[in-house]
Every structure is written in structure tokens, then in C-alpha cells.
Amino acid sequence: MLVESASGISVEYAVQLIRTILLELERIYSHTIYLNRMFSYTENQVLINHTIAIKDALLDCFEEITGHRMFGTGHVFGDVNFNISSGNIKLIDKIINYTSSIFNKIKKLTNQNASLESLFKNRVIISEKDILQNKITGPFSWFNSLNSDLREKEPYLAYVEPQIQTILGNKGAINNNCIHSRILRLTSDVDNSIKIIKFLVDKYTPIYHRKEKLEQPLLTRGEYTKMIESPRGLIDIHVTVNKMGIIETIKITSPSDINKAIINNTLKGTLIDYTKPAFESLYLSMMEIDK
């Protein structure tokens, strides 16, 4: 998207629709992995198996549509490098209905699960002060009056649709930012992703045949910035292009680069036995703990 902007490439709306749908599918996938990790500490096999079932269904969907297990490999400047057939649309619709059905069960079990509350309620709290001072992004910053969701603040792709803005505006009020409330926050976000995909599929049925690949884009000298709302928060990319039209510098700031600033405050008072779930509750991987 940044290169497209820097080179003046116009992207037709059908491509923007497809990108939005697949980004939201990836969002569900990412949140499902997170929930699976949190549920694993309760040893509730029903919740664990439900999240595994959704994860596997989404991976199969990606592979069927893009030829790969994830969407990131599917980009071409100004286009996508795969076709979307009526069969693909039916598959997406089927996967979303399946995911919605399973997720409704997850929500009921989550709300009724005393183990989740006893393990995680009022633990590893992210304060509103920490969010504001460290400019924390992503779902963990969406509580009380705060809202840093770039899909709402600076909509891109098909997020400009009024119906999608209405969906994104319904995040619900969560007054506490402990592990338990973050689990509830992500289940709510998955619900919104399901609604966004269903809306776009039902309204547009975006069947699409990819075009001929573009030659290498001609970039204009200057500095360019692009931000996108990933499942864990903002990804910020800054690029400098020289007078020859060659990219000289690339700076990428990931959500973890920003969110790690709250680790010390949030982990204060955490029992040793809770260290691993505490880190994972902040959407940090084990590799990021090593860093």
C-alpha cells in the first residue's frame, strides 16, 4: 500500500474488498491463537479444541484461496496474485458461518468459566496512564473512552464503508484491563471481524480475476509513511526514496516495539508461576520474551 501510494498506482475497489476480507480473516486467526494460549492454562479441553478447530479451518481457507497458509504472500502492486471465484466466495461464507457457530459456543463457555476468572481476573493490569504515556495501540488500548483503532480513525481499503464503521464503533465498554478483560475484548473483536466479512461478502460478492503483473513501480523521490491496524496494534512503515527512485531506508515499527514499554509496570507483583501467561496475555510471543 505504501509503494502504491508512492508511485501513484490506483487500486480498484474489488482488490481493496478482497484485501479487507483476508485481513479480517487473518485477524480472527491471530486472536484465535491468543485465546487458545490463554484457554490452555485452564485445561478446558472444550475451549482449547474449539479454538484449534477455527485455526485449522482458517488455514485451510487461506491455502485454498491464495495457495499459501497466510495472506501476506498474496500481494502484487495494484493487485493480488490470485483469483477469487464464486467457489472461493462460497468457501469464505462457509468458513465464516462455521467460525461464527463455534465462536458463539466459545463466548458462552468463556462467560460461564469460573477458572478463567479465578486465574486471570485483576491480574497483569494495563493502566490507562500506561496506555496514554506509552502510546499503546491495539485491542488492549480499547477500553473506557480510549480508541486507537486505525480502521476507525483513518480508514483505508474497504473500512471506509459506513456499515463497517458502525460495526467497529461497537466495541463494548470494559472498565478493567486485566488478563480476563483482555480475553473478553478479543472475543468481541472476533465478533466484529465476522460481521465485517459477512457484510462485504453479502453486499459485493467480490469475484475477481487478477490482471497482468505491473512492471517495477516508479517511485517518486520523498519520504512516505503508511500505517495499518494489525491484530496486535499498529504497524508503522516509513520509507525514504532517493532521486533515482530507489528506496534508501525502511523503518518498521511493530506493535511489540511499542507495547513492550508497559512490561515492567504490568508485571510488578506477578507471581513467578504466572510469568509465562502474563507475557502471553500481552500478545507477546516466547521469541519476544527472549528479546
Image: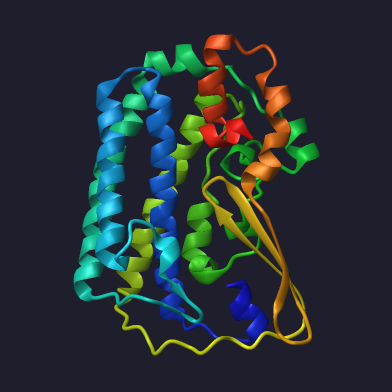
Coloring applied to the structure: rainbow
Q: In which quarter of the image is residue 210?
A: bottom left
In the rendered image, the vertical position of residue 157 relative to residue 128, given as above or below: below
Q: Residue 233's x, y, as percent?
A: 60, 48
Q: Residue 271's x, y, as percent?
A: 59, 9
Location of the C terminus by quadrant is top right
Give the total number of marks visible in the rendering.
0
Is residue 146 visible in the rendered image? The answer is no
In the rendered image, the vertical position of residue 126 relative to residue 233, given as above or below: above
Residue that appears at 43% across and 77% down: 15
Residue that appears at 50% across and 36% down: 185
Please indicate whether residue 174 sits to the left or right of residue 167 in the image.
right
Location of the N terminus by quadrant is bottom right
In depth, the one of 151 and 258 nearer the eye is 258
Please indicate whether residue 291 sits to the left or right of residue 112 in the image.
right
Residue that appears at 38% across and 88% down: 211
Q: Residue 235's x, y, as percent?
A: 62, 55
In depth, the one of 4 and 24 nearer the eye is 4
Residue that appears at 75% across and 44% down: 135
Q: Residue 190's x, y, as percent?
A: 42, 45
